[in-house]
Image (cartoon, helix red, strand yellow):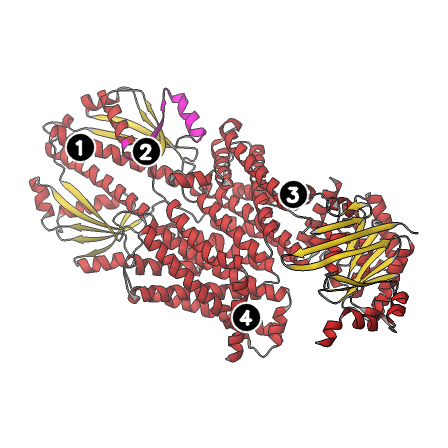
């Protein structure tokens, strides 16, 4: 059995009367790609923000990378990378400057930062863009870059919140190649998405609806269990039966 | 027209949804009028002075007493020698030192002439001038009385003064209208310039521009809600300044409100104009504040009479919108004059608003092409 | 500390990369300083008179000549119609109306007292009062002369006269430029620091980049320091620029220690930026930030003793001013520059600035939430 890097027990998050996360329970293992599936407003982002220390749970136990999300948020932050659905690199800084900034914040030495940037740019075939402002790059490149920045300091886990919103299928495919490469290096990937085809790329998926987990398992196992031909069918079938009726 | 109404409604919804902005819109002007009505004052009262009395006779003590009981001055320290003067002035404890030389009273009685001196701290020139003049005036009064009482001299020229429009010499008559003009224009210009650049920055302006709304409609839609809100603010401000500072409205209330609304329109159109020349909110804020904050304080006649400035500034002050408004509302409120005395100012404000609006529409259209 | 340096470097890059801002933070203060410093004066250089001379004798003419000789008063209109005189007062064409009654000369000749009616436009209470004090002084002098002439031959020593001489220290020529430059310069560095610093943080919130910073292990105080230092440096640079320009264009004296002034300016700016960050931490949009900041900014400026004296304010306002960093900074700047006051004279004020600065910065650090 692989090591558990994220353990969530009875996680509840309330905003006033609204229950965004209703008793969530799941585990994520080291090195796996864990997909969080659900429609908009299902509570994916809320859970992800709690896991990455941006928000604290109303109740329940959440352990991330060996630390308690309730009390040790800052320690968690040392060990994770994060990329959010709104694109969040600085548009008025160059590619190199953005990476340097985050490398610096995570306490990497300037020599190491320089060396890693060169490696990274070569690997992404980004050399020509190194000194271009982020603002002028196409969205697909920006997203690849944001992902690279999120894992630049070699975190144990990286959280991706709808990372591929708004780009074409080819760019999405390329983005997932980056994710596979990161996972191959041993980085645990926790990704939320509402693209059902992307769910097929995950090792395990967890389907959320109205704040609850309705199904969890490997894509193949889930399809078998519910007799669906694709995750999309599965999702429409089990996640939104109510929506179907309306 | 229906489209326009829909658009105006949207603007109202934006404003009312943002409670803090609403508080700002009403709270800031009222608080500031109340606060500044009290604190902006040029008068001298209880000003700290020190007295160096080397004579210590009946006359000098009597005079010192008169200075300090006048209400203008308060004796903070009694000095013993000339060396102390530097110390107290440098530390900023007192604004002036009054010096009676040795044998002051004796000189006055035996020779009929005595001299005293005032050493004032010139770092605040206006204050120093006032202090010197007030002390001199008190001393002159003193010697006139001495002459009248003791020698029975009757002075032939007896000037009698009537302070017109403001018999109680309240500083508020000068500064409350000033604060009104100041706060109104900055808030109006900032408000509009920011909301519009915000739409530009977040891309919602594009949606408006491709809609069938015309440039003029968009501008009207932005202006109307703020006009309505500013009207409420205006009424509250006028009421507060009448209630608290007894600022009169001697002229026609209708005229006053009409001209104030024109001024508000001017502020809003200035804001729109600024938004059309700035790329983002930060620029809009920078331009609005830098073009209004200091120029309005200094060149509108709010605190400093423009007539006393070098000629070039007098000319430049005609570019400052608040100047016209200030002249107009002082004429209406305090002097009780009618349109005959404010038509020039009214015309100037109409003209300025028109220019800003036309330039804005032109800039909008250029963006479309 | 290295982390902070990375963040600071980023702020500078962003500011100077913005073509408008990069120029504005240098050009605007310079231009405003050069334009507005020479403008301000409260000196009463001329009072426009309208004279109603019903007497028209050599006595009344003598009186008017005496009044004009002072150089302050200038006769702009002569009229016999009272209506006309008062309409001139209404239209601001004259500031004062002097009414000399019929029989003025005759009465003076006979040694009878005569009343002279003086009407002043008193909307501006201070200038009204000051011009009245001037006029009264002139008339007193004339009274003394007349009295001496009439009885001088008999008992000249009976009349008592106190001469008052004025001496002005530190700004001997009562140069308003030397008074205004420190004030306007302080306003400018405050505005620059507040707008740049505050908008910067709120903008990161609006765009969402702050979230990326929030998931890093950066410490709260590191973040606040990184958001404060660049703007502190820019404002201080503007201060230095302003002082040099003042020296060149307005021959601004600098008697005291430059080091002391910069020390106080640093403490002052920490207070201002502390407040700025505190406001921006609690604001959701640039608009909200701006209006709250504007509220404080105007209070600081108008209550700070820059244009009007703080001494004459009511007690409660003086108490509010204990928390107004601008008051301390203004006092210190003028004292250090014009009087050469030292650490002993301004120690208390510096301590006050330090206290305000630390309090606000600590509040900002505590108020900043990395988690929502």
Q: Position of residue C37 (x, y in %)?
A: 47, 47
Vertical side of A140 occupied by C32: above or below: above
Which chain does the residue under circle 3 lie in? C
Give the labeled residue for mark 2: B73
| Magenta stretch contains residue A111 | no
Q: Which residues are magenta?
A: B69-92
Give the labeled residue for mark 4: B10
Give the labeled residue for mark 3: C229
- Mark 1, other Cα within 10 Å: few <14 / some 14–19 / many ≥20: some
Which chain does the residue under circle 4 lie in? B
**Along the line of sight, which residue is nearer the eye, C102 or B88?**
B88
Mark 1 and mark 4 on one chain: yes
Vertical side of B278 occupied by C327: above or below: above
Marks 3 and 2, how far apart at CA: 44 Å
Vertical side of C155 occupied by B315: above or below: below
**Along the line of sight, which residue is nearer the eye, C323 or C329?**
C323
Q: Position of residue B163 (x, y in %)?
A: 24, 49
- Mark 4, other Cα within 10 Å: few <14 / some 14–19 / many ≥20: some
Mark 4 and mark 3 on one chain: no
Give the labeled residue for mark 1: B145
Mark 4 and mark 2 on one chain: yes
- Mark 3, other Cα within 10 Å: few <14 / some 14–19 / many ≥20: some
The quadrant where residue A198 appears: bottom right
Which chain does the residue under circle 1 lie in? B
Q: Secondary structure at mark 2?
A: strand
Marks 4 and 3, how far apart at CA: 41 Å
Q: Indicate left or right for C370 with B220 as reference.
A: right
Marks 1 and 4, how far apart at CA: 72 Å
> Mark 3 or mark 1, which is nearer to you?
3
């Amino acid at each position: 059995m692989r090591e558990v890097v994220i353990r969530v027990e009875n996680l509840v998050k309330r905003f006033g009367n609204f229950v965004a996360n209703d008793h969530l329970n799941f585990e994520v293992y080291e090195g796996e790609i864990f997909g969080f599936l659900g429609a908009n407003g299902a509570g994916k982002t809320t859970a992800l923000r709690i896991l990455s220390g941006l928000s604290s749970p109303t109740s329940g136990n959440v352990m991330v990378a060996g630390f308690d999300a309730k009390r040790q948020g800052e320690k968690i932050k040392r060990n994770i990378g994060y990329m959010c659905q709104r694109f969040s690199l600085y548009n008025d800084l160059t590619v190199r400057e953005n990476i340097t900034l985050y490398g610096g914040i995570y306490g990497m030495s300037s020599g190491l930062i320089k060396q890693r940037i060169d490696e990274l740019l070569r690997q992404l075939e980004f050399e020509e863009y190194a000194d271009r402002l982020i603002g002028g790059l196409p969205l697909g490149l920006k997203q690849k870059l944001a992902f690279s920045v999120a894992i630049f300091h070699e975190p144990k886990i990286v959280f991706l919140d709808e990372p591929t919103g708004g780009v074409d299928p080819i760019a999405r495919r390329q983005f997932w190649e980056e994710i596979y490469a990161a996972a191959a290096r041993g980085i645990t990937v926790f990704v939320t998405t509402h693209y059902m085809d992307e769910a097929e790329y995950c090792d395990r998926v967890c389907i959320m609806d109205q704040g609850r987990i309705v199904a969890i398992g490997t894509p193949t196992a889930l399809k078998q269990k519910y007799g669906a031909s694709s995750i999309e069918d599965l999702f429409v079938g089990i996640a939104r039966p109510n929506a179907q009726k309306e | 027209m229906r489209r326009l109404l829909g658009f105006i409604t949207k603007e109202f919804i934006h404003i009312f949804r943002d409670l803090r902005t609403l508080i700002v819109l009403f709270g800031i002007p009222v608080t500031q009028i109340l606060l500044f009505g009290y604190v902006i004052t040029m008068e001298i009262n209880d000003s700290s002075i020190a007295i160096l009395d080397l004579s210590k006779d009946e006359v000098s003590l009597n005079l010192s007493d008169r200075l300090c009981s006048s209400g203008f001055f308060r004796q903070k320290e009694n000095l013993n020698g000339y060396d102390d003067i530097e110390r107290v002035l440098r530390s900023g404890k007192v604004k002036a030192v009054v010096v009676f030389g040795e044998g002051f009273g004796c000189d006055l009685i035996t020779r009929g002439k005595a001299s005293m001196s005032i050493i004032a701290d010139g770092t605040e020139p206006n204050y120093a001038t006032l202090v010197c003049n007030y002390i001199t005036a008190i001393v002159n009064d003193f010697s006139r009385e001495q002459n009248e009482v003791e020698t029975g001299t009757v002075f032939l020229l007896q000037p009698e003064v009537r302070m017109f429009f403001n018999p109680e010499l309240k500083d508020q008559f000068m500064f409350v209208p000033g604060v009104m003009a100041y706060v109104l224009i900055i808030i109006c210009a900032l408000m509009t310039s920011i909301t519009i650049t915000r739409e530009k920055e977040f891309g919602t302006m594009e949606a408006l521009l491709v809609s069938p709304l015309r440039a003029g409609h968009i501008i009207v839609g932005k202006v109307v809600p703020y006009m309505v809100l500013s009207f409420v603010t205006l009424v509250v401000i006028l009421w507060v300044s009448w209630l608290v500072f007894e600022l009169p409205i001697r002229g026609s209330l209708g005229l006053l409100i009409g001209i104030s609304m024109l001024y508000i329109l001017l502020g809003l159109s200035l804001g729109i104009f600024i938004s059309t020349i700035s790329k983002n909110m930060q620029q809009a804020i920078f331009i609005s504040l830098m073009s209004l904050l200091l120029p309005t304080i200094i060149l509108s006649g709010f605190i400093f009479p423009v007539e006393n400035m070098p000629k070039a500034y007098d000319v430049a002050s005609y570019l400052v919108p608040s100047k016209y408004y200030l002249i107009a509302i002082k004429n209406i409120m305090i002097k009780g004059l009618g349109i005959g005395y404010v038509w020039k100012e009214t015309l100037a404000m109409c003209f300025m608003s028109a220019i800003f609006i036309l330039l804005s529409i032109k800039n909008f259209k250029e963006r479309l092409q | 500390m290295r982390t902070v340096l990375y963040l600071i470097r980023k702020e500078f890059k962003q500011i100077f990369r913005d073509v408008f801002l990069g120029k504005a933070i240098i050009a605007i203060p310079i231009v405003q300083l050069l334009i507005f410093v020479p403008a301000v004066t409260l000196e009463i250089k001329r009072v426009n008179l309208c004279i109603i001379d019903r007497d028209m004798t050599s006595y009344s003419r003598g009186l008017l000549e005496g009044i004009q000789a002072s150089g302050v008063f200038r006769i702009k209109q002569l009229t016999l119609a009272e209506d006309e005189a008062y309409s001139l007062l209404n239209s601001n064409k004259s500031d004062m109306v002097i009414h000399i009654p019929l029989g003025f000369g005759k009465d003076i000749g006979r040694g009878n007292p005569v009343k002279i009616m003086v009407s002043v436009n008193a909307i501006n209470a201070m200038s009204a009062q000051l011009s009245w004090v001037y006029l009264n002084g002139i008339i007193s002098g004339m009274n003394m002369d007349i009295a001496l002439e009439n009885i001088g031959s008999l008992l000249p020593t009976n009349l008592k006269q106190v001469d008052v001489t004025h001496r002005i220290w530190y700004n001997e020529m009562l140069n308003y430029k030397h008074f205004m430059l420190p004030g306007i310069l302080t306003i400018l560095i405050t505005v620059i620091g507040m707008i740049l610093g505050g908008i910067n943080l709120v903008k990161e919130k609006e765009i969402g980049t702050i979230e990326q910073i929030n998931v890093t292990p950066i410490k709260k105080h590191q973040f606040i320091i990184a958001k404060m230092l660049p703007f502190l440096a820019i404002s201080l640079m503007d201060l230095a620029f302003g002082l040099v320009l003042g020296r060149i264009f307005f021959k601004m004296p600098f008697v005291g220690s430059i080091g002391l002034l910069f020390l106080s300016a640093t403490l002052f700016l920490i207070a201002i930026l502390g407040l700025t960050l505190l406001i921006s931490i609690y604001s959701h949009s640039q608009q909200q930030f701006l209006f709250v900041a504007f509220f404080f900014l105007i209070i600081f400026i108008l209550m700070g003793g820059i244009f009007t004296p703080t001494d004459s304010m009511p007690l409660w306002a003086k108490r509010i001013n204990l928390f107004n960093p601008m008051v301390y900074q203004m006092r210190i700047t003028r004292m250090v520059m014009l009087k050469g006051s030292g650490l002993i004279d301004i120690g208390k004020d510096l301590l006050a600035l330090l206290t305000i600065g630390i309090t606000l910065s600590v509040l900002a650090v505590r108020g900043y939430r990395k988690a929502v």
